Image: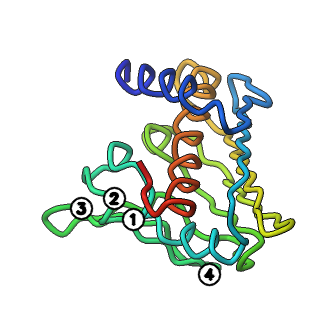
Amino acid sequence: MRIWLAVAALTLTLTTAARAEVVDSTPGGFQVRQSVEIAAPAARVWASLVQPALWWDPRHTWSGSAANLSLAAASGGCFCERLPGGGSVMHMSTVHAAPNARLTLFGALGPLQNTGAAGHLNILLSEKDGRTTVTLTYDVGGYMKGGLATLAAPVDGVLGQQIQRLKGQVETGKAG
């Protein structure tokens, strides 16, 4: 857990190009928000967004490889990961998919999977003049011994890293 917190703190420092914010934080839950402008139309951003294997940081997977990630961008779909030996992880399920505009997922990311917490991850795409603003909001609630407030900043940092990697993938073809 200490390593995860250190990585998240470093990530917060490195992601200054994105607007990041812990909007609210209590023992029972939190909301974090990230926003970044990508120099590409929404259709191109969406095409990369729904292929997390292209941009998700492999350090934030259970298998150690982003190539094992998939995202079915249709209601009832799965943001899932294949594990060695035939196992798998369901990170989140798709609740709302509006191509080029909105993706809403439900579930628990990373260490939240080991708690009684879950949340809605909303990703909104807004295009203007061929550029797309991506706004990501993650509302988390539930139970975790000691409270969820301690995870708000680290989760915000990791999501900030992911949105920067998406930006890199779309704009340059390289996530990292």
Q: Which residue is mark 4?
A: 74
Distance between mark 1 and mark 4 Cα atoms: 17 Å
Distance between mark 3 and mark 1 Cα atoms: 14 Å
Local SS, label 2: helix
Q: Which residue is mark 1?
A: 53
Residue depicted at x 79% and y 28%: 24
Q: Residues within 10 Å of mark 3 (few under 14, many from 20)?
A: some
Q: Which residue is mark 3?
A: 83
Which numbered dot is residue 66? 2
Which of the two discs, 1 and 4, sits closer to the camera? 1
Could you tell me if the residues under marks 2 and 3 are in contact, i.e. CB atoms within 8 Å?
Answer: no
Q: Residues within 10 Å of mark 1 (few under 14, many from 20)?
A: some
Q: Position of residue 153 (x, y in %)?
A: 61, 25
Q: Amino acid at mark 4?
A: Ala
Could you tell me if the residues under marks 3 and 1 are in contact, i.e. CB atoms within 8 Å?
Answer: no
Q: Position of residue 128 (x, y in %)?
A: 86, 65
For marks 3 and 1 on the same chain, the one whose residue lies earlier in the sequence? 1
